[in-house]
Amino acid sequence: MSDIAPVLSVKQVTKRFPGIVANDQVDFALWPGEVHVLLGENGAGKSTLVSMLAGLLQPDEGSITLGGVQQNINSPQRALELGIGTVFQHSMMVPTLSVVENFVLGERWWKRPPRAGLAQDIARVSKEIGVQVNPHATAGSLSLGEQQQAEIVRTLLRGSRVLILDEATAMLTPQNASELGQLMRRLVAQGLAVVFITHKLNEALDWGDRISVLRLGRKVGEITPDSLRALSREEATRQVVQLMFNLDAAQSREAERSERISSCQREAKPVLEIHALEVSDALVPVSRIELRIRPGEIVGVAGIDGNGQKQLAEAIAGQRPLSSGRIWLDGISIESDSIGDRRRRGLRYVTDNRLGEGTVGTFPVAINLLLKQIGDAPFWRNGIEQTAAIADWSRTRIREYDIRVPQAETPIGKLSGGNIQKAVLARELGGTPRAVIFSKPTYGLDLQNIRSTRRRIQETAESGSAVMLISTDLEEILELADRIAVMSQGQIVGVVDNDPNARARVGELMSGVQS
């Protein structure tokens, strides 16, 4: 590709949001006839970069060039006019309309849509790229793979030179994903340039010509086509994992990490046991979950967001029904217990949706601190609210957890995210919890509140509770967990001890590399 100019170039692009630099001076180039794979963890900046190419966001600094000409991609329509088509993870088609009807959406309203001609064009392009798209089928009747094929056909009908596939395989079956990979290879053989965003390293190595890695908003490395061809599968895997998870920088710190739980605790009977747990009532079904957590132990649950972690947490907490399986708390079966009964036995759940689910924004802080004990003595007697008892309790919890609030009667929705999280922790960690599930507990918090929350998690384990820590922040899990379970597509694909090799092994499991 050295003699061919890139069809698209991104130079020193920076995009900031309040409190975060999502893309930091990113350089990225795309050549015709090439699948350029973009890899990175959650929060690495992939979606932000793609959104700028698709016209959904504009860069604060830097430039985007197409065909050697600098462009201002200030809208999705402008991106389409420039020949950039994007297919997202979730289909953008209206499910009640036919494929043809979806394709004419957004056309000039005063002209009758050329449906017959468009149907012929869909059939022609489908045949050219080796897929079968029925132009008259209702979009909702198509499988996810068929919907994505239809959306790819739509981008080609618009004359796209660049095709962006954003997590396009995330919701597909292995067979559909393989078909999409083969389709990508056919498209680049015809001269199209493809940006393929994925979390699965096997897919990147199977279908990619060039691989770029983002980490914490910066581009940290690129493997060129010549290098990729020269590397063995194992060497390429090792190099990509090292770039994605920054192995060299963390090896020494993790090698010195002290053991939290003693040998006697390791031999202790588990506090929380999960056996053959399955949840079918979910977008990502959870299946065959086996996990045991001992007193004083933190088990991290790592994985790309949306792989069943939230469904698992809700099933354990009683907020989502099980299809099958068993849950024991201190040796007592609780899968048939209500949420309240599980809480009274000592099971606590810190949700990742602290305002929408964990609290009621219009209720006072004091009531939110007792939200799961409403009606219980000594705060209520014979259905009558005991104002003094509630006030004393709330003042104590506000002081202990340093909740910055004018008064206990202030609606909790008026507080900052960090103070809302402190209130949730004050409620869930009160009393004597036996097992606590933390779901993305530091998401969206500032550095000070992140440190404070992580310290609470450590103290919870040190008090003898069993802790499940679900997080998409691998650094957080490596800092806190004793063992790490990795979830992918609703299953635990591996459990590793948090030793000096944990980062590499977790990275491989998260990227779909099986031992």
Image: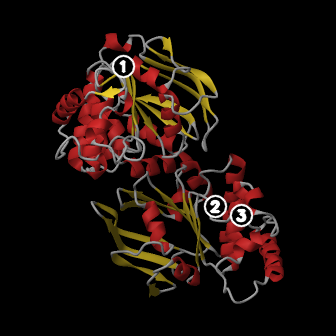
Q: Hey, what amino acid is under mark 3?
A: Gln
Q: Is residue 473 visible?
A: yes
**Residue drawn at the location 50% of the way across and 47% of the way down:** 237
Please say if 238 is above or below 49: above
**Residue drawn at the location 18% of the way across and 45% of the way down:** 404
**Residue 231 appears at what percent x and percent y?**
52, 53
The quadrant of the picture occupied by the C terminus is top right
Residue 434's disc number: 1
Q: Secondary structure at mark 3?
A: helix
**Residue drawn at the location 50% of the way across and 38% of the way down:** 309
Which residue, given by chain and number where applicable, does mark 3 sit on? 149
Q: Is residue 3 visible?
A: no
Please say if 329 is above or below 485: above
> Is 345 placed left or right of 5 in the picture?
left
Q: Hey, what amino acid is under mark 1?
A: Arg
Which residue, given by chain and number where applicable, does mark 2 sit on? 91
Q: Secondary structure at mark 2?
A: loop
